[in-house]
Image (spheres, coloured by chain):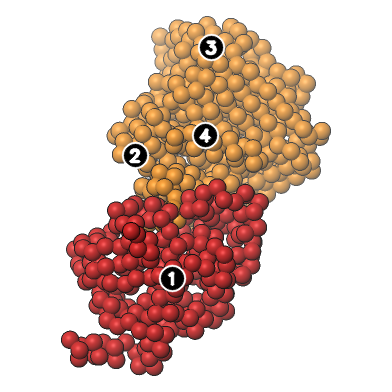
Amino acid sequence: MLKTASSVVVARTHGLYDRLASFEGAPLDRQARVAALDRFFSTRSGRERPGRYWRVDLEGIAPAVECVDASFGTVRIVNPNARVVACDLSTAASAHADLFAQVFGATGVAQSKFGALATAFAHLGAFVYVSADVAAAEPVMVTYDAPDGTAIFPYTLVLAERGARVTVIERCDGGNAFACGVSEIVTNEGADVTFATVQQLGSEGRAVFTRRAAPGRDATVTWADAQLGAVLAACDISTAVTNPGTHAGVTALFFPNARQHVDVVSTIDHLVGDSTSETLVKSAAVDAGQARYLGNIRIAPHAQGSDASLRDDALLLSPDAHVDSVPALEIGANDVKAFHGATVGALDAEQIFYMTTRGIERDAAERMIALGFFEPAIARFPTEALRERIRAALAAKLS
Amino acid sequence: MTEPGLRIADLHCSVAGNEILKGIDLTVESGRVHALMGPNGSGKSTLAFALTGHPHYDVTKGSARLDGEDLLALAPDKRARAGLFLSFQYPAAIPGIKVANFLHAARQAVRPGELAPAKFRALLLEKMDTLGMDPSFMGRYLNDGFSGGEKKRLEMLQLAVIAPKYAILDETDSGLDVDALKDVCDSLNALRASEEGRSTGFLIITHYPRILQYVIPDVVHVMIDGRIAKTGGRDLAHRIEEQGYDAIREEVAAIA
């Protein structure tokens, strides 16, 4: 067989190709699904050089073949806003075909390894559309549920027209399941989208999320991601700033305990100037939990007037816990502001002493300090109910 | 037979191998105000940390009893629950813990189950008003981004809310402007006049006599080089104001 230098031949013998059978039809035809699966097998994750203690290779992550079926998993969409469209993927692809086409795959998410996998099996999902100048008063809630032993590919899409405002809360709940999900946000001029995600799979689950945003001119896109469940959780969040006046926000929090691994990458690409971004990451690790965070801030050579900040703090709560925190700032322009601050450390002895002098037991003081450490990040998640859910999950890891 | 009072006897304390306290004898009685004065570096703050159980302060000799209970055998939280309170000169900032939640946890720890949440809130607002603190303080993170004056007010608020048996105030007056000092002293005097706080014994550490114009001490001690060099009435504070610590130092040296 002849092979050109740039092509990779995929044998298509893997059992996952057979599983495409149950995924026929909208939003993708078989050919496109096969192509996406080809890309999954032929693309590197870009995360193949883990830290020296890292025990998991992201390259090898794939669902067990027998766990993949279009009938697995559910999505519940709650949209209290009369003027906001929120529906499942097949409804979106048929009833809102033109709008759907503007966002599905528009961020290039399928170019990434796990974005390609989620695309190949795109079926379970939600589409949120906000027309021009509509401000959604209430968050749209999208809740995925993956029962034990299933693989799901949750795909959430948000399209916000000029001046639209919306908050979307995506939860991924379930048992010891495999979830490979995608989020895509596309906005027009001056839109404001907050997308908050909380992953709480069972303690033997695996979760891999790829999230991409393409904000319009003067638009704001704010991600808030909490990876709480699963034994392996990987999340890759990226916003491409291609229009001036954009504000890109990222908040990420994670707290591996027991034998959990969490791997988070955030990327802000300032491809044009006069744009701002703010990244806040709070992580802790306890027991043999380990986490890796890679924070990319890239400011292109012509992107003058970019203003980017990246703050990441990690708390190590036991001797076997690890957090690798790697900020990566590539600044190509000279008239920019770029701030970076990072800390990694144990609990502060003076803080503990101070609290104990108020009669608070040492264990309780340590818990309060550790949970308090996350508060600046928790505060950036929408709704008190969601914040309480996150607090409860973090507290459970400490008990 | 337990002897009431915060009784410190022949207390020696070292920090990183250096002996700072060289035999302190001092008793603070319930409801009384003792001032502990002395120049910088004389060991006043070391006494405060030794009594509250800071892990870096090694008590090498002597005893400290609170109404008969052996403080030195207790962990810091148990010392607090026994009735000891320290107002820190430099309190720790703890982002993420709200003032209201912290105060509630502290009050519950020291005086468990006494106040319903609504009553606790009312108590807080009343004490904050005395201290000239805006109610918005309750929602702020503990000492996080606080000015020096705000930190001291918050220490006084904790003191008022906990109403301990014995309170050590470590240079609470330092860095305060006159208005802030007056608020702090109003709060102290309000506590001393209250049902909960009338039996609180105070050890007020300061190197300026200023605070003692508002909170009148019953006894004044002067600490020099890790020892109580002189003990007297409130006139001793006036003398220090006029003559400085050198006069005391020379007097003590002459006797020795």
Q: Please report contact status of discs 3 and 4: CB closer than 8 Å, yes or no.
A: no
Q: Locate residue A369, reporting x and y percent.
A: 45, 48
Q: A316 or A21: which is nearer to us?
A: A316
**Secondary structure type for disc 3:** loop
Side of B243 where B130 appears, left or right? right
**Secondary structure type for disc 2:** loop
Asked if badge 2 and badge 3 are on a common chain, one would say: yes
Instruction: Specify the label residue A318 is tagged with.
Output: 2
Above or below: residue B226 compared with residue B208:
above
Which quadrant of the figure contains the N terminus of chain B? bottom left
Quadrant in the picture for residue A144: top right
Mark 2 surroundings within 10 Å by alpha-carbon count, few (fewer than 14), some (14 through 19), many (20 or more)? some
Farthest bottom residue in view? B242
Residue at image x 77%, y 32%? Answer: A80
Tell me which numbered mark, 2 or 4, is placed earlier along the sequence. Answer: 2
Residue at image x 49%, y 37%? Answer: A395
Side of A195 where A232 appears, left or right? left
Q: Locate residue A223, reporting x and y percent.
A: 59, 40
